[in-house]
Amino acid sequence: MRNIMLAFVVLMGTLAFGQDYSKVELYGGVQYRHTDVSEFANTAGFNTSGTYFVVPRLGATVEVSGNYSDGKSAETFMAGPTFRVGSIGPLQVEAHALFGDERASLDYCHSTYVNHGFAMAFGGSVDYSVTKHLSIRLADVDYLRTDHFNTSENSVRVSSGLVLKF
């Protein structure tokens, strides 16, 4: 019984955490990706996401990103949980685990090869709050694993941009 009461108190404390919090975050920014496969070694692109926080610390995120270079492109479409780790002054730290699909396209000898494969990203971000409704995402760093063209890729991607909060 004592364990049930303790769990209830912890849960209520989590739900009551900072009643004045934004439920929706929309992010857009630029992205750099380094991959261990030579065809997609170093590419630049964009990263966008939307997160709905069900409770103050736990949200659901949908993300779309793309990276492009001469004759090659990769777009990811992923979703998963986001956890607000905490804040230090105006800095907000979040962690996420995203799962979905990557569409890779490669132009070779006047032909275009397209493949869809599994994608997953584990990482986090640090935001600097400018106002109640605007933050600057100083860094969003992810380990990105993708599987397509009969091979697996291990990537690191870094992005930065603006976050609108509602």
Image: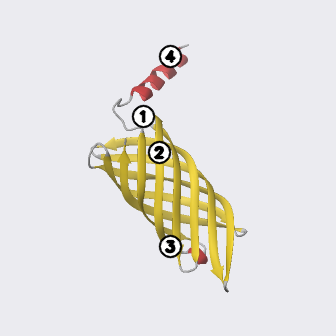
Labels 1 & 3 near each other (Cβ < 8 A): no
Compared to residue 9, the image places residue 39 above or below, namely below
Labels 3 & 2 near each other (Cβ < 8 A): no
Labels 4 & 3 near each other (Cβ < 8 A): no
Mark 1 vs mark 4: in front? 1
Label disc, if present, on residue 5 of the rendered structure = 4
Residue furthest top in the image: 1
At label 4, the amino acid type is Met
In the picture, the quarter occupied by the N terminus is top right
Q: Which residue is mark 3?
A: 43
Q: Earlier in the sequence, mark 1 or mark 4?
A: 4
Q: Residues within 10 Å of mark 4 (few under 14, many from 20)?
A: few
Distance from disc 3 to disc 2, alpha carbons, whole Å, reads 25 Å
Q: Secondary structure at mark 4?
A: helix
Q: Earlier in the sequence, mark 2 or mark 4?
A: 4
Mark 4 vs mark 3: in front? 3
Q: Earlier in the sequence, mark 2 or mark 1?
A: 2
Q: Earlier in the sequence, mark 4 or mark 3?
A: 4
Mark 2 vs mark 1: in front? 2
Labels 1 & 4 near each other (Cβ < 8 A): no
What's the residue at 43%, 61% (across, down)?
159
- Please give left or right for residue 26 compared with residue 34 in the image: left
Q: Earlier in the sequence, mark 3 or mark 2?
A: 3
Q: Which residue is mark 2?
A: 51
At label 3, the amino acid type is Thr
Compared to residue 148, the image places residue 41 above or below, namely below
Measured from the top left, where is residue 64 in percent x and y? 53, 57
Q: Residues within 10 Å of mark 3 (few under 14, many from 20)?
A: many
Distance from disc 2 to disc 1, alpha carbons, whole Å, reads 12 Å
Label disc, if present, on residue 56 of the rendered structure = 1
